[in-house]
Amino acid sequence: MVAALDTPGGARAVARCDGLREAPYSDMEGGLTRGYLTPAYRAAQDALAGWMEAAGMAVRRDAAANLVGRYEGEAPGAPALMIASHLDSVRHGGAYDGPLGILLGVECVAALHAAGRRLPFAIEVYAFGDEEGSRFPAAMLTSRAVAGTLAPEALDIADADGVTLQQAGVDPATYLSARRRPEEIFAYLEAHIEQGPVLEDEGLALGTVTGIAAQLRYALTVRGLAGHAGTSSMALRCDPLPGVAEMVLAAEQVARADASDAVATVGRIEALPGAANVIAGEVRFTLDVRAGEQARRDRVAHAILACCRDVAQTRGLDLAVETVHDLPPSPCDPELMDLMDAALADAGQPVFRLVSGAGHDAMNMAALCPTAMLFIRCRGGISHNPAEHVEPADAEAALAVMLAFLERLGASRHAR
């Protein structure tokens, strides 16, 4: 049973993640799906609350249904370092995306508690609820509420079954009271699996995150002329689907040619009317462009869209482009990055920095306080997949770095 794992350390954090992928902590049989405010979410919170209490924390749930464990500092009521990640998962996802960062935070506190130590600041371990947005049609509601950036109208939502937030167990009228003030939380730390192959390719277990990449997402619609698949000659067709094929290849070619950290992804294509014997009259697809710097992201995105317009003009197609998301980069704090680099060296790990191409709760918390992130190698760079895997030794190394980071952060707070 997951609750019986009692050997402290990073390996225990991995083992607990493994246990949380099974019933009653998953909403599906034979895999992991844990949606915000579902029975599996509540069960996982209950297990986590027990581990937080055993580590010496006072535990509560806030108005957004985040689970919070607080370990007081040398002076009661001192400002806190928040260590956090998310407890929910995508459908049929992996065990470590989110929970590992929370459980490593618990292990940090457990180590301090076992040694009878307090730091010049409190530690609050947060388990955010819906980073993935896999149940309700919005993501990161709970961290946005804590950061104070969530608009009240964002709470007027329901899941695919028509269940509202209130029916699921939270009160929209008090939800925003989960907000924290800058004088309460002075810094934020998130450990997370990389969800990419860079660390493994470099032969490294860990890396300091420089920030979260800027993201542009578009919805493109390409219109031509539907027709009979058997009677419309090739020369007279105005088929949007081959044109979209050219556009998809152009996205790949432009991003590769930039020879940078820029990436471009076409994740969804829909041909209408969608019959095997009908030439498509309309094709819809998505384009996601990301890069560590906004200017580089914009350059690549604009070049791809220019290619798409050229293809449409050459083929006599109508092209409509809608911007769905325009998220700026979220850089990590330079001083905290330097502390993380030093902590890596203290723990005997090579110092290495990398950007996050994926979004994380840290991007919201940056509106509240300075942020830092530590990436942990995952096998094959695979994530959002049952094959997601983290070596216990890498989690042990991550815990050592996090504890060294806490020591250095404590020294810097004492020096002020």
Image (cartoon, rainbow, N blue to C red):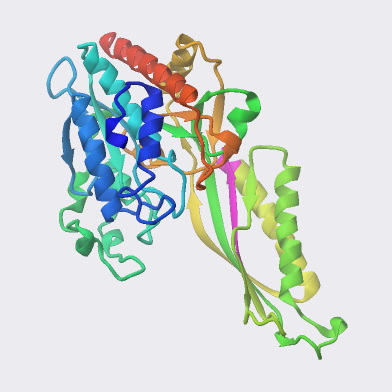
Q: Is residue 115 above or below residue 143?
A: above
Q: Quadrant of residue 361?
A: top left
In the image, residue 318 lies in the stretch drawn in magenta: no
The answer to whether one can see residue 183 in this image is: no
Q: Is residue 256 above or below residue 311?
A: above
Q: Is residue 178 left or right of residue 16?
A: left
Given residues 217 and 111, the one toward you in this image is 111
Instruction: Give the residue displayed 16% in from the left and 39% down from the top.
Output: 60
Q: Quadrant of residue 368?
A: top left
Q: Is residue 178 left or right of residue 266?
A: left
Judged from this view, the residue extending furthest toward the right is 235
Q: Which residue is rendered at x = 25% and y = 58% of the image?
A: 152
Specify the farthest residue to the left. Answer: 76
Q: Residue 59: which quarter of the image?
A: top left
Q: Position of residue 122 (x, y in %)?
A: 21, 23
- 286 part of magenta stretch: yes
Main SS of the magenta part reads strand
Quadrant in which the N terminus is drawn: top left
Is residue 233 toward the left or the right of residue 20 in the image? Answer: right
In this view, 224 is above or below 150: below
Q: Position of residue 101 (x, y in %)?
A: 38, 33
- The one of 148 and 349 positioned closer to us in this rendering: 349
Q: Seen in the image, is 140 located left or right of residue 244?
A: left
In-front residue for pair 120/393: 393
Between residues 290 and 245, which one lies in front from this camera angle? 245
Residue at image location 69% in from the left, 80% down from the top: 280
Image quarter hosting the C terminus: top left
The magenta region covers 285-295
Q: Is residue 257 visible?
A: yes
- x and y percent of residue 80 in the render? 23, 26
